[in-house]
Image: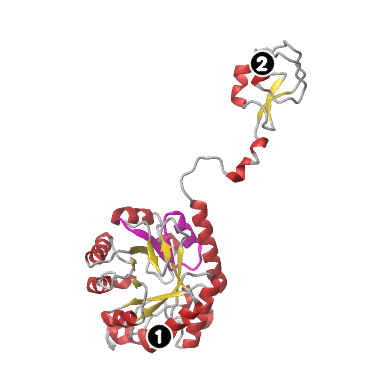
Amino acid sequence: MNKFITIEDRKIGPDFPPYIIAELSANHNGDINRAFEILEMAKRCGADAIKLQTYTQDTLTIDSDKSDFKINGGLWDGRTLYDLYTEAHMPWEWHKSLFIKAKELDITIFSSPFDSTAVDLLEELGAPAYKIASFEAIDLPLIEYVAKTGKPMIISTGMANEEEIREAVETARNAGCKELIVLHCVSGYPAPSEDYNLATIPDMAERFDVLTGLSDHTIDNTTAVTSVALGACLIEKHVTLNRGDGGPDDSFSLEEPELKQLCLDSKVAWAATGKVNYERKESEKGNMIFRRSLYVVKDIANGEMITHENVKSIRPGYGLAPKYLGEVIGKRVKIDLSRGTPLSRDYI
């Protein structure tokens, strides 16, 4: 496993702060100016990248009213796939303008392609990386096509079982992908936090020998921030300007204050996780004096014996450590010691 991958000079891995992807998805609501505003918001919040989805209704499905093509239940109940994707797709003629805008803002932009023609478009635009969406994780020909670009790849694993994840990883590697991150994901919209089983993240890293991250569809940041402590080096979250605007993905997306908090809290979680370390920390050293130690609590004359009545373990910590109490009891002192003197071997 690589210790990190690099997207536009930003190293991503356990030894670096979490990489935060703001997923624009369908939250443009058919307005390119709204898409521009989301890019600006993501940059203000400190996100590392903005991500698009590159498909059309015709590259994803066919226009059919048959029951196979109708959605039953959930956010989009009763709609046909063709109708939903017509509304949700990012017009391909917008992509160039969005890439230019991202460059002006100095924020990384890339996309999830849903077929080879989308990859071709994104290659023309100079996409620095690719994300394979959960629903496409079983599309091995698409993964192979993306891998052959030689760009870093991120694969989301919602709904995929162990065998399907292994096939996706092996396909990517066999086709030449050198930089890969696999995202733990639950493809519910929104997804309940208890379904996430974040303990899967370190297991996934070991089982498939990959860097791991989280594609999070819960409605707050708790799950995402927690994932960092379990090894997630990348977090992807849907973002929007306003959850009440009625877009297809608005209801499970973060607004600006929440995205800003995610960018801050995930870095705090990463810094706090750190590495195995039993050494005394710098922030603790000043408090050493407030630990207990052995002190003279009653005047002791030269030659007098140390007892439990004249020496006790109390604060502060300038005397012998309390563990030596049994050793010094019954010994005699060689100078006069007044009450409040820290006990030292030099006095015994």
Q: Which residue is mark 1?
A: 96
Local packing at callout 1 (Cα closer than 10 Å; few below 14, some 14-19, many 20+) is some
Q: Secondary structure at mark 2?
A: loop
Q: Which residues are magenta?
A: 209-235
Compared to residue 345, the image places residue 107 above or below, namely below
Q: Position of residue 237 (x, y in %)?
A: 45, 70
| Quarter assignment of residue 201 | bottom left
Q: Secondary structure at mark 1?
A: helix
Q: Position of residue 335 (x, y in %)?
A: 73, 15
User: Real-space Cα distance between discs 1 and 2?
Assistant: 83 Å
Left or right, 348 with respect to 226, comes to right
Amino acid carrying label 1: it is: Lys
The residue that appears at 44% across and 77% down in the rendered structure is 24
Left or right, 171 with respect to 199, comes to left
| Quarter assignment of residue 196 | bottom left
Compared to residue 144, the image places residue 305 above or below, namely above
Left or right, 265 with respect to 4, comes to right
Quadrant, the C terminus:
top right
Local packing at callout 2 (Cα closer than 10 Å; few below 14, some 14-19, many 20+) is some
Question: Which label belongs to residue 54?
Answer: none
| Quarter assignment of residue 70 | bottom left
Left or right, 314 with respect to 109, comes to right
In this view of the protein, can residue 240 be seen by the observer? no
- Colour scheme used in the picture? secondary structure
The residue that appears at 25% across and 61% down in the rendered structure is 166
Query: In front here: 295 or 308?
Result: 295
Q: Is residue 79 magenta?
A: no
Query: In front here: 184 or 243?
Result: 184
Amino acid carrying label 2: it is: Ile
Q: Which residue is mark 2?
A: 348
Q: What is the count of numbered marks?
A: 2
